[in-house]
Amino acid sequence: MKFDLDTAWKDATGLLSRNFGLLAVIAGVFFFLPYAGITLALPEVSQLQNAQATGNPEVMMAAVTDLYVGYWWVFLILAVIQGAGLLAMLALVRRRANPTVGEALTTGARSVPSYIAAQLMQSALIVIVAMLLVGFGAVTGLQMLAALGGVIAFVVICYLVTKLSLAAPVIAIEGELNPLRALQRSWSLTRGNSMRLFAFYLLLLIAFIVLSAVLSLVFGLGFALFGEQAALLGEAVVSGFVNATMIVIMVCVLAAVHTQLNRLASEPDGAVEA
């Protein structure tokens, strides 16, 4: 059988409705407050947004580099905090033992080193693939070949991200703390359904981008009417809210996808395709 997008979405919305209160609290503590706090505390964040508004790739890259070089330790702490929160929410919605919030938070804290290690492995793989494909075209000096390498690299990266997207559910829900085995398990679960899964993720991403753009525009203009400081506060609040909302939906989607693919893999015809 094949992965069913409609079933996955219905399962995800069901998880969201049943666990909304607890998920909102965890997302608020682990995502909204840290994200909004960093936006307010670091003036370079507003400079980055100004650079993005210019549309100049070189200006944007310089702003991103300055931000991460100057505050790498802040983003490392943020990654640990948000990783623990993500894993805790996954454990909360899909652990068979129906853990309490405290047990889910303990699972998140215990699992976060494995999650970060898996993310680093995935990132390293993506960087290596991108460098090989783009670098080969660049070495030849042919612009067309370099551009083709960039397109192929983008497609391959999308494939890799889709295949490895279930590492977090495997760690949080199945309790697999070996990061390499978690990535291998994700690869195995998505076998035969990669294109459908990518289409599902892409549709959700497009919907989220449109919604976040509308919310940022509407509320940003509203806060801007009260002056520059109010605009900065509003930008932090809206960005934090959008980020937390995205994470909550992503958690429910990943849990629903993991459940369906795990069920399909256990069926006699669930793993017949490569």
Image (spheres, grey):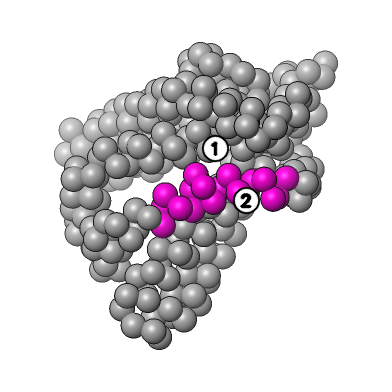
Residue 93 colored magenta?
no
Query: Label 2 is placed on what type of residue?
Result: Ala
Q: Is residue 71 at all visible to an observer of this figure?
A: yes
Write down the region rendered in magenta.
19-36
Q: Which residue is mark 1?
A: 86
- Compared with residue 196, is residue 20 higher up or lower down, i.e. above or below? below
Residue depicted at 62% across the width and 41% down the height: 251
> Which of the numbered marks, if any, corresponds to residue 24?
2
Q: Relative to 71, is 92 on the left or the right?
A: right
Please say whether residue 31 is one of the residues in the magenta stretch.
yes
Which residue is most to the bottom? 225
Q: Position of residue 120 (x, y in %)?
A: 38, 26
Q: Are marks 1 and 2 in contact (CB under 8 Å)?
A: no
Q: Nearer the viewer, residue 69 or 28?
A: 28
**Residue at horizontal 53 percent and vertical 70 percent from the top:** 215
Q: Position of residue 88 (x, y in %)?
A: 59, 33
The quarter of the image holding the C terminus is top right
